[in-house]
């Protein structure tokens, strides 16, 4: 008899995020139910309430903070308690737990001195768990980035985290905090206070035993990537230490899970070499414990292959992707999320290697798998088709790329409305459609279809302006975390306006071109990036040329004005001796001589 085994898949629908956000708005009683016969954890609830009633030391620091804010001569809370103020209150509470308050300026030292105090106060175990889980997050919300970095690279704190949360949960929190620090801190330099010597904690202990209480401290400036590497290395060392102590052998399943999590985090932090080493180690442990054919092995191979692609080892990465694909197929897991992602990565790599026939076949297979899992008209399918079109355009396959861009746009537009409205998700989808319009316009202009290209560029400009307006409205939400990522929409808007002006000049529509260039000049501000400033300088030259063609005194006056501004900008951007700067200066001199022949 033939046995049918249904292929399972796990799909995280985007609307679940909105469900969680709605749940977060519920009042506290719904999340903390009263004790009754049907509440299995009622004893824990009572224990929490008892600790809150009996412990008064936790209120001292918040009350002192509020008293300081209301003291004359300081900044009072005129506008109420702000978000960062709440986090400062929590941090001050966590650092002054128990009776022993450190006089050190270093929060790391304060945490070490208060470690014993946390263990003896009522509810100390829960307080310790809260400190190691959430303290770095509170510090980052207070914009104390250097302090957060110091804690996340401190072996003592990371050791406490592993002992309190366990190796898997501690690794997950550490990786998440390092990624969040990299996101919010950006390129800001971080000032880290370190103890002299390779192992600060052991040296402190040795000095105290020998009667030397003072220790030299070194203040160094580090970038966030160095913190990510140090924090990842230390969490692995601590996990190995705890795994050896508890399980007697380091090659455990939990250890492999930790290595894989750290490797994936390093890859997201753009540290492919360190990521590849951790992932290869995880693959070896997985194969030894679970055998060569297991989805965990395939997942780790897939991530290791992505790291190899970043390192430029494309041939080795191709072998890893192919091995992962064979394991997924052997495990009857070809429709799992990671399996589809692996197949798409393999197809993209084939495009980069020039094997277009295999790449096209693979991408069609990936699109079919996504349609099987998600349905015909859905965002994941549209994203996959769009990714394929981008790769085709990158390698000069313009006709096929145009067809796929059109198919991706049609799929986006056919996506049904969500049961639970997610505003941010809708904004991102509309932005994807806008970028597709710009890519279609670029291809059509290269093929000579100028009028259609202009129409697509104008659609793209409207979409970009709507996206910027919607994003500004979204950022007004006080509960939303500030977005520190780069907003490239403005750069695309400036470039699109420049292309509209250029194309309209080609078809003889000088008035339309002048309108496009004028809009570009209005969009570029003083704080715009250098690429936008260069586009603005070129737009001044175009406007000057258009006005020069009109045989009126006012037009000639405007042409001189635009050319002067172009000269000033080119001098500031490229210098006075650049060939373009000298050419503009020569043209300006000639135009002035033509307009004032008697001078």
Image: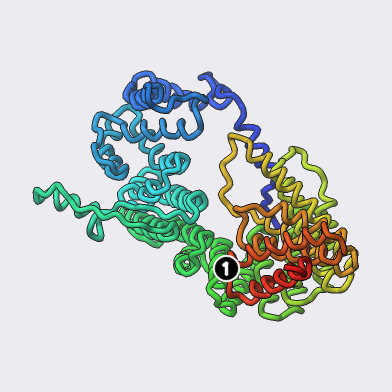
State the image coordinates of residue 103 (x, y, percent, origin top left): 23, 37
- Is residue 1 visible from the viewing direction of this image? no
Q: Residue at x 38, y 34 (%)?
A: 126
Q: Check the picture and name the quadrant holding the C terminus.
A: bottom right
Q: How is the image coloured?
A: rainbow
Q: Check the picture and name the quadrant holding the N terminus.
A: bottom right
Give above or below for 591 relative to 458: below
State the image coordinates of residue 105 (x, y, percent, origin top left): 28, 41
Give above or below for 365 relative to 472: below
Residue 408 lies in quadrant: bottom right
Residue neighbourhood size for the residue with mark 1, other residues' Cα within 10 Å, grouped as few (<14), some (14–19), many (≥20): many
Q: Residue at x 71, y 50 (%)?
A: 428
Q: Residue at x 29, y 29 (%)?
A: 121
**Would residue 482 be found to the left or right of residue 377 on screen?**
left
The front one of 308 and 370 is 308
Q: How many marks?
A: 1
Give above or below for 179 relative to 422: below
Residue with the mark numbered 1: 306
Disc 1 on helix, strand or loop? helix
């Amino acid at each position: 008899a033939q046995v049918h085994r249904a292929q399972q898949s796990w799909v995280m629908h985007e609307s679940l995020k909105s469900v969680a956000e709605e749940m977060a708005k519920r009042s506290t009683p719904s999340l903390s139910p009263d004790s009754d016969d049907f509440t299995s954890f009622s004893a824990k609830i009572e224990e929490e309430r008892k600790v809150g009633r009996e412990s008064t030391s936790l209120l001292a620091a918040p009350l002192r903070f509020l008293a300081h804010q209301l003291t004359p001569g300081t900044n009072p809370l005129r506008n109420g308690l702000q978000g960062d103020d709440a986090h400062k209150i929590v941090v001050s509470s966590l650092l002054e737990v128990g009776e022993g308050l450190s006089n050190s300026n270093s929060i790391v030292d304060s945490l070490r001195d208060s470690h014993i105090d946390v263990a003896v106060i009522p509810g100390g175990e829960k307080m310790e768990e809260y400190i190691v889980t959430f303290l770095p997050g509170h510090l980052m919300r207070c914009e104390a980035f250097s302090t957060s970095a110091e804690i996340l690279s401190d072996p003592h704190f990371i050791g406490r985290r592993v002992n309190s949360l366990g190796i898997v949960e501690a690794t997950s929190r550490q990786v998440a905090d390092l990624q969040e620090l990299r996101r919010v801190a950006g390129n800001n330099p971080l000032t880290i206070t370190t103890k002299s010597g390779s192992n600060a904690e052991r040296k402190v202990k040795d000095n105290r035993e020998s009667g030397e209480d003072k220790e030299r401290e070194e203040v160094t400036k580090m970038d966030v990537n160095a913190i990510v590497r140090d924090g990842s290395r230390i969490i692995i060392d601590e996990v190995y230490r705890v795994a050896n102590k508890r399980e007697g052998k380091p090659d455990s399943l939990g250890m492999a899970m930790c290595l894989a999590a750290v490797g994936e985090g390093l890859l997201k932090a753009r540290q492919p070499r360190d990521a590849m080493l951790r992932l290869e180690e995880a693959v070896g442990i997985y194969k030894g414990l679970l055998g060569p054919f297991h989805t965990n092995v395939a997942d780790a191979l897939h991530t290791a292959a992505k790291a190899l692609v970043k390192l430029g080892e494309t041939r080795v990465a191709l072998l890893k992707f192919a091995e992962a694909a064979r394991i997924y197929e052997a495990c009857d897991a070809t429709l799992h999320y990671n399996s589809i992602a692996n197949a798409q990565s393999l197809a993209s790599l084939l495009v980069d290697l020039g094997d277009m026939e295999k790449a096209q076949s693979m991408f069609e297979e990936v699109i079919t798998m996504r349609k099987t899992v998600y349905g015909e008209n859905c965002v994941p399918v549209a994203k996959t088709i769009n990714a394929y079109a981008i790769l085709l355009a990158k390698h000069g396959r313009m006709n096929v790329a145009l067809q796929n861009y059109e198919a991706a746009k049609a799929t986006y537009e056919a996506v049904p409305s969500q049961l639970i409205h997610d505003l941010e998700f809708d904004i991102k989808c509309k932005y994807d459609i806008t970028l597709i319009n710009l890519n279609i316009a670029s291809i059509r202009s290269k093929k000579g279809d100028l009028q259609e290209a202009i129409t697509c560029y104008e659609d793209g400009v409207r979409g970009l302006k709507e996206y910027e307006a919607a994003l500004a409205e979204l950022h007004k939400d006080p509960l939303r975390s500030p977005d520190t990522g780069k907003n490239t929409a403005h750069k695309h808007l400036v470039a699109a306006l420049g292309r509209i002006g250029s194309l309209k000049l080609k078809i003889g529509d000088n008035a339309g071109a002048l309108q496009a260039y004028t809009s570009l000049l209005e969009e570029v501000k003083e704080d715009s990036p250098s690429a936008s400033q260069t586009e603005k300088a070129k737009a001044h030259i175009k406007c000057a040329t258009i006005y020069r063609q009109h045989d009126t005194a006012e037009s000639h006056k405007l042409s001189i004005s635009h050319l002067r501004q172009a000269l000033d900008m080119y001098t500031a951007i490229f210098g006075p001796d650049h060939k373009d700067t000298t050419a503009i200066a020569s043209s300006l001199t000639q135009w002035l001589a033509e307009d004032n022949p008697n001078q």
